[in-house]
Image: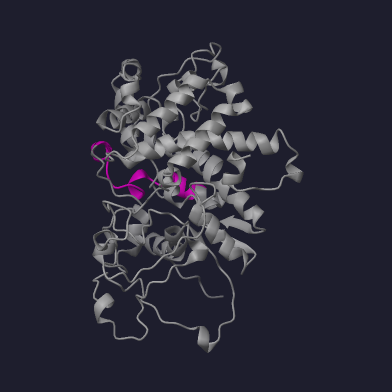
Amino acid sequence: MAEPENIDRRRFIQNGMRLSLAISLGGIGTLAARKATGDQWVWQIDPFKCTQCGRCATECVKDPSAVKCIHAYDLCGYCDLCGGYFKPGANRLETGAENQLCPAGAIERRFIEEPYFEFGLFLTYKGLEAASKEVDVVLGGEGADQLFGTGGFAGGRPAALHYLLKKYHLLGPGKQAAKLIKGPYFYEHDNLAFKLRMLWDRATDLNNWYFYGYDQHELLQFCRDPKLAIIPTLFPDGDGARNPVLESLPPTPDTLPSSFEDFFLQTQINQDLKHYVNENVMVKSGRMADMLGLTLRETYLDTEVTDFLTSLDFPMKRAGGLSEHLRGRIKTKYLHRKAMEDLLPSEIMQKPKQGGFVPLMIFLKNPELRNRIYQHLLSSEVIKEYFKTDPLKNLFANYERVQGKEIYWHNFYNSKVHRILFLLTFDIWHHFYMDSNPLTVNPVTLTEYIGK
């Protein structure tokens, strides 16, 4: 019997990364066996050889050109702020050539319908919907970012600050200082004060890491019953803020890992994997797949793969120590980059992660629609049962106050829209699943619902 070929660690990692690259970069990958005829074949640019020189747009020698723009409506989230249509940082969302990616007007689009989807997962939903017409099983790449060290929001800066506060026994005073910046000025204005307050909140309370939801201070102001105003604890040692009303909870221990690398591993496991992947992304993706009759299998979340990737040393995931995290100068997905460094051009390898968010502001840009949502929520019996009216009116009035003003930070507006839509989502859920028989519910559009 022939001896198996020995494979060194580097070659093993490279082979594995090359196999997984398509899934991890695409988010959701579909594997399907299909028959193809000669008429179905088209040619395209090899992404592994492309250097993004830009000349193919004007010097293409093939007919038709491989850079022809086609709007894939089956995969489109129907966003007004379209990343394939407008330049990044466009001054206005209008059809002027100075705002478009293609000044020659080669990219065309058309209005489809009022967007009414679960926000945050538009492309995932449309991708799964398109896949359901062709295959029964979908292989997904959920968890790749978190397992390969791209997690840790704001570049890991809040975690780095938290580590320093703990190391020098300043976490207690830091939390006291956080109470001084809880006034309206730090919540209701699109300025540097809002950003600094949010960063400090996340640095002093690791449970407050995902800022789109209501924080502890806001919940205590909004909820009629203060016992309901609690942020779930993500960390097993109880690190983070507590609801002051719940006096029976044990005190927070002041433990400190031996190094920042060990501390970041704790945040990766508790924030990124246990909470964000397991309780957020996977729940939504799994439910959408079930709704569309698909079997969803996540390639990176095999237990052995997850255990292996989680156990890898910190430098194999993120290049940069404590000081680099404080300055936001880190290189993530280090394993992927090393595996592909001999295959991809340096300009591709050096590109930062191109993440994004769903600009929910565009869904509430219609003043009439906003007013109808406000009035619906203020008259909703379940909203009035759980939430105080005056803070709600203040939330709506503040959002109206910033309309038409120059945007300092898009996430300020996005966070406010999240808060409004969370209330609307709670109202819709309660109406259809608590006040009604969910088995007999007939789905309606948002316009029909708030107009009922």
Residue found 36% across the figure and 44% down from its top: 314
**Residue 194 against residue 229 in the figure, above or below:** below
Q: Residue furthest top?
A: 247
Q: Quadrant of the C terminus?
A: top right
Residue found 23% across the figure and 39% down from its top: 327
Where residue 14 sits: x, y (%)?
39, 63
Residue found 64% across the figure and 48% down from its top: 444
Residue found 66% across the figure and 48% down from its top: 443
Q: Is residue 210 visible?
A: no
**Residue 36 against residue 379 in the figure, above or below:** below
Where residue 256 sits: x, y (%)?
37, 25
Q: Quadrant of the N terminus?
A: bottom right
Q: Is residue 231 left or right of residue 441?
A: left
* Colouring method of the image: one colour
**Residue 104 against residue 445 in the figure, above or below:** below
- The magenta region covers 307-326
Number of marks in the rendered image:
0
**Residue 240 against residue 29 in the figure, above or below:** above
Where residue 146 sits: x, y (%)?
44, 46
In this view, the residue in front, 372 or 55, is 372
Q: Secondary structure of the magenta portion, mostly?
A: helix
Q: Is residue 49 left or right of residue 113?
A: left
Q: Is residue 336 left or right of residue 126?
A: left
Q: Is residue 315 magenta?
A: yes
Residue 211 sits in which quadrant?
Answer: top left
Q: Is residue 302 magenta?
A: no
Where residue 439 sits: x, y (%)?
76, 44
